Amino acid sequence: MGNAIKSEVKHYSAIKQIDFVKEASDSLTQWITDRRDRALVCALSNDFTNAVVCDKDNGFKKPSKNQSVSDLTKTITADDKMNVKALRRAIFQARAGIKYDGSQAFPIKPIRSETITQAGIPVQNYSYIILLDSYAINQLKEDKEWQEIHKHAGDRGDKNALFTGLVGIIDNCPIIDMGVWTSLNVGLLNSEVSDSEFKTHLNTQNHNKVTPPSSYAGNTAVSIGALIGASALVMAGNDSVNFYISESEDAGRKPSVV
């Protein structure tokens, strides 16, 4: 004779033993991190008031009178690519407090400041961080001036940046490949990211003007990078994620995240 009580289905029994807090912690943490990073990228990329626009002939474009940032970026063509002159112009504008049209602006505070002694005289050396997407990084690596710089810098042989795939440093400012924004990856924005997706991750209450990436493109798709200094982005929040579970609701299976 068999047992008169029917055994539970094996999979149902396993479900009852799931630690929902443990299972949710990793996935929710990753989801929150993704949301946070996308919000930061969108906030950083909204409503540029200063810019350096790459140019195939002169390195960077010079605006006409009263030309806005978005009007200037709309003149970009497929031949205008990231280059050393554009990066150095961005660093100069940040240090000197100059806008793209030559007018005055507040200098950007550096990420780091270190004292270097030259001929017995202490000199302050400022560092910013340059963020580029993978498209701009590839264009930069094709720039002849960039290649010449790295031929004579750093380690020789296969450890040189030309061979390791690492980007490098220019005028004491590290250049970081931030990747490309996709549905599966949080990278820097480009003009092909939809307006609706951009606005989904932008807190419009913090901005007087909303400029999605498409507003910077004319007939050619454009990549958007950024030079950042101290306090480029400020975000309030806890260092860790806290989970609160009400045992009386839905058998304690739905945690709240704070």
Image: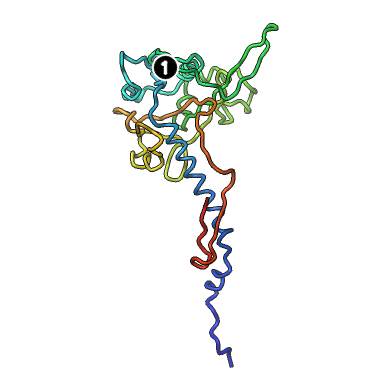
Q: Please give the name of the residue rendered at 45% of the width and 26% of the height, measured from the top-left corner.
A: 139
Residue 95 at x, y = what percent?
A: 51, 16
Q: Determine crowd level at label 1: few under 14, some 14-19, many 20+ residues with C-alpha closer than 10 A.
A: some
Among the 4 quarters of the image, the one containing residue 220:
top left
Depth check, front residue: 193 or 256: 256
Residue placed under numbered mark 1 in the picture? 99
Residue at 42 percent of width and 31 percent of height: 45
Mark 1 residue type: Lys
Residue 175 image position (x, y, % from top left)? 53, 26
Quarter of the figure with residue 129:
top right
Q: Residue at x 63, y 25 (%)?
A: 157
Q: Is residue 87 above or below residue 176?
A: above
Measured as percent of width and height from the top left, residue 171 is found at: 56, 18
Depth order, front residue of 67/156: 67
Q: Nearer the viewer, residue 165 or 2?
A: 2
Q: Position of residue 60 (x, y in %)?
A: 40, 17
Does residue 33 sit above or below 76 in this rendering?
below
Vertical placement of residue 203 versus 253, above or below: above
